[in-house]
Image: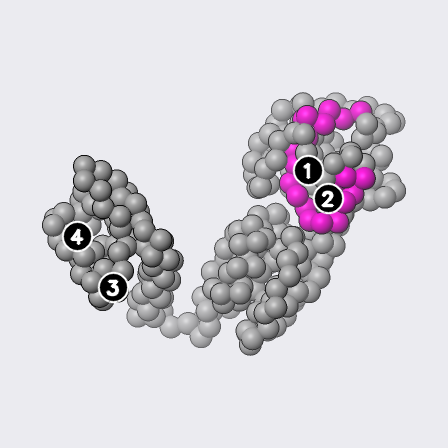
């Protein structure tokens, strides 16, 4: 098994058929076919299901498993080549959900990179379940998640608790009494902010999910909020960014406030995890400012 064989396999998977893979790799179809057959012979497994007259490829179950291994090999090769270009003292990989990476830790990440030039950082954005898997596999050093999950090898610590607020994109007169019952539930923009939030949502709306639109990123939620018909319950950090230069109305809950809890997770055998987390905590004040709601932002209460 050699570099050219694995590269040929990855090219075929990415481009969907041998013809396109060969063209993009600047080699002949026969060459790329021979490399894959050689790889299968050495591994003693069938990677690709072959059917007469079918041009698109389909991976076998063994091929699907090997694809994951090939991706890791590709990353290792990239890292090895980078060593020739620049010597790093440390490699750090951090994963987080969209709302934490882009609305809480974005400035922290920039400062980490700026102040630690001999450290190579890899910041990844995934769903909470995916981050658990990455931490368990030691693909990433630490993760920041919202959804809890039992794991024998992963330690979990509370990172922060953040208040949630209601955001509207329509005129609201000062002194107007806003109630949850007055909202059109079919126009809710919904992100699952964790178990505590789903319990709160079920208590006040009668169900844990939504009758409206469920999204997974703050960017997409903000796009929908450009229409006056939609509303959302979102973290303070997100609301503060959304209201910059826009006439959005932020409504604070004066009792039974909803909130979300973010957790830090890391493999218990990862010796670097704690030091990485401590580096992030150096910017604790910056993080606290992100989740602090000023009175100039929230003009109304429920």
Look at the numbered disc 2 and give the secondary structure of its residue. Answer: helix
Q: Which residue is mark 4?
A: 32
Quarter residue 250 falls in: top right
Instruction: Tell whether label 2 touches label 1 (CB within 8 Å).
Output: yes
Look at the numbered disc 4 and give the secondary structure of its residue. Answer: helix
**Residue 65 or residue 114, whichever sits in front:** 65
Q: Is residue 154 left or right of residue 240?
A: left
Q: Is residue 144 above or below residue 17?
A: below
Q: In the rendered structure, which disc, 4 or 3, sits on the residue that comes first in sequence?
A: 4
Look at the numbered disc 1 and give the secondary structure of its residue. Answer: loop
Report how far apart the C-alphas of labels 1 and 2 lie in the structure: 7 Å
Disc assigned to residue 44: 3
| Residue at the image point whose x is 66% and y is 36% from the top | 190
Report how far apart the C-alphas of labels 3 and 1 lie in the structure: 47 Å
Report how far apart the C-alphas of labels 2 and 4 lie in the structure: 51 Å
Instruction: Tell whether label 3 touches label 2 (CB within 8 Å).
Output: no
Q: Which residue is mark 1?
A: 209
Q: In the rendered structure, which disc, 3 or 1, sits on the residue that comes first in sequence?
A: 3
Q: In the rendered structure, which disc, 1 or 2, sits on the residue that comes first in sequence?
A: 2
Q: Residue 10's spot in the image, x, y percent?
A: 28, 53
Q: Residue 174's spot in the image, x, y percent?
A: 84, 27
Q: Quadrant of the N terminus?
A: bottom left
186 within the magenta span: yes
Q: In the rendered structure, which disc, 2 or 4, sits on the residue that comes first in sequence?
A: 4
Report how far apart the C-alphas of labels 2 and 3 lie in the structure: 48 Å
Q: Is residue 249 visible?
A: yes
């Amino acid at each position: 098994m050699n570099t050219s064989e694995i590269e040929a396999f990855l090219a075929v998977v990415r481009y969907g058929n041998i013809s396109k893979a060969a063209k993009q790799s600047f080699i002949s179809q026969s060459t790329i076919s021979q490399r894959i057959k050689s790889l299968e012979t050495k591994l003693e497994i069938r990677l690709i299901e072959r059917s007469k007259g079918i041009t698109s490829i389909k991976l076998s179950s063994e091929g699907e498993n090997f694809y994951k291994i090939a991706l890791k090999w590709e990353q290792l090769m990239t890292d090895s080549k980078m060593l020739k270009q620049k010597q790093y003292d440390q490699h750090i990989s951090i994963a987080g959900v969209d709302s934490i990476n882009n609305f809480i830790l974005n400035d922290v990440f920039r400062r980490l990179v700026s102040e630690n030039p001999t450290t190579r950082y890899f910041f990844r954005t995934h769903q909470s379940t995916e981050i658990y898997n990455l931490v368990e596999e030691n693909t990433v050093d630490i993760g920041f998640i919202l959804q809890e999950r039992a794991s024998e090898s992963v330690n979990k610590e509370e990172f922060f608790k953040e208040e949630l607020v209601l955001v509207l994109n329509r005129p609201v007169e000062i002194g107007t009494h806003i109630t949850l019952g007055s909202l059109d539930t079919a126009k809710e923009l919904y992100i699952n902010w964790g178990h505590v939030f789903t319990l709160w949502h079920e208590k006040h709306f009668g169900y844990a999910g939504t009758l409206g639109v469920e999204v997974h990123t703050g960017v997409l939620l903000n796009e929908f909020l450009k229409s006056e018909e939609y509303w959302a319950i979102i973290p303070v950090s997100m609301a503060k960014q959304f209201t910059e230069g826009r006439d959005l109305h932020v409504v604070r809950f004066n009792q039974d406030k909803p909130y979300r809890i973010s957790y830090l997770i890391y493999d218990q055998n990862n010796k670097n995890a704690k030091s990485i987390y401590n580096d992030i905590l150096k910017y604790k004040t910056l993080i606290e400012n992100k989740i602090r709601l000023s009175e100039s932002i929230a003009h109304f209460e429920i």
